[in-house]
Image: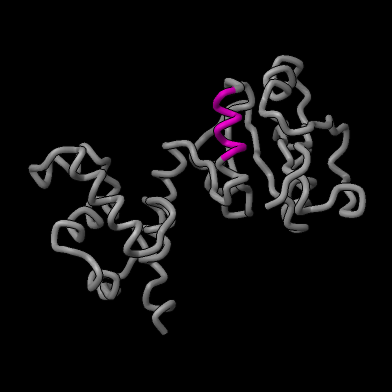
């Protein structure tokens, strides 16, 4: 992604101040979400958009996603459920409208690196939802892993944190983190969410 400019759509003055302090990228304030790909090339712009509390700009945001714009979405009252719904529609990140500039900058850099930005609660909710759909017969992914790594994955699929997995396996949290690192590397997954999605789709990928 060769982003040349951040486009900011926000109606709260304090939030605008925070957003404006993010990164060294050129920024432009948007007063409308009716964008043309000619004026705002899709691959050159990251859109930072406040989802208005009354939902009045929802259709406009969905239209931009259908055009494949990269969007970091902000909500005044973020929730795991709302975050999941929007990630399924294609957003790249999800944050509180009034997040600290440092956190917004982290999210921007994460997205520009080709990843998605998830809050912990949204991440866990998505993992839980997907894990429920993983078939017990879909175990081809196990062949590349050690027994302890398989136990670690099973903990992740059960929605457990690193600390909970460590307690269950009677090992240190640091060792669990090492297992997770090795698992992601072996299965070519970017993060825990991507890992769960890969496992869910393993049989189809192998076919």
Give 59 or 164, whichever is nearer the viewer.
Answer: 164
Q: Look at 48% across and 36% down and name the residue there.
A: 119
Eyeballing the image, is 168 above or below 106? Answer: below
- Which of the image's four quarters has the C terminus? bottom left
- Image location of residue 121, percent across then percent down: 42, 37
- Image location of residue 101, percent across then percent down: 61, 22
Which scheme is used to colour this image of the protein?
one colour
- Image location of residue 76, percent across then percent down: 63, 26
Q: Look at 59% across and 38% down and name the residue there.
A: 109
Q: Report the magenta stretch's main SS.
A: helix
Give 182 or 49, whichever is nearer the viewer.
Answer: 182
Q: Is residue 41 left or right of residue 124?
A: right
Residue 103 lies in the magenta-colored region: yes
Give 54 or 78, whichever is nearer the viewer.
Answer: 78
Residue range highlighted in magenta: 102-109
Q: Look at 68% across and 44% down and name the residue there.
A: 71
Q: Is residue 124 left or right of residue 156?
A: right
Q: Is residue 45 left or right of residue 164?
A: right
Q: Look at 61% across and 47% down and name the residue there.
A: 92
């Amino acid at each position: 992604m060769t982003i040349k400019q951040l486009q900011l759509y926000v109606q709260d003055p304090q939030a605008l101040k925070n957003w404006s302090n993010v990164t060294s990228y050129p920024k432009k304030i948007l007063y409308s979400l009716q964008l043309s790909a000619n004026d705002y090339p899709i691959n050159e712009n990251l859109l930072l958009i406040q989802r208005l509390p009354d939902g009045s700009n929802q259709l406009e945001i969905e239209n931009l996603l259908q055009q494949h714009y990269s969007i970091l979405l902000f909500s005044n009252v973020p929730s795991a459920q709302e975050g999941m719904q929007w990630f399924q529609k294609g957003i790249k990140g999800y944050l509180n409208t009034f997040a600290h500039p440092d956190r917004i900058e982290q999210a921007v850099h994460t997205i520009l690196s080709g990843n998605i930005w998830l809050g912990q609660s949204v991440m866990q909710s998505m993992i839980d939802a997907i894990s429920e759909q993983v078939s017990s017969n879909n175990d081809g992914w196990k062949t590349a892993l050690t027994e302890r790594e398989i136990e670690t994955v099973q903990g992740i699929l059960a929605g457990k944190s690193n600390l909970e997995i460590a307690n269950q396996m009677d090992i240190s949290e640091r060792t669990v983190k090492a297992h997770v690192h090795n698992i992601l590397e072996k299965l070519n997954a970017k993060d825990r969410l991507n890992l769960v999605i890969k496992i869910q789709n393993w049989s189809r990928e192998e076919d």
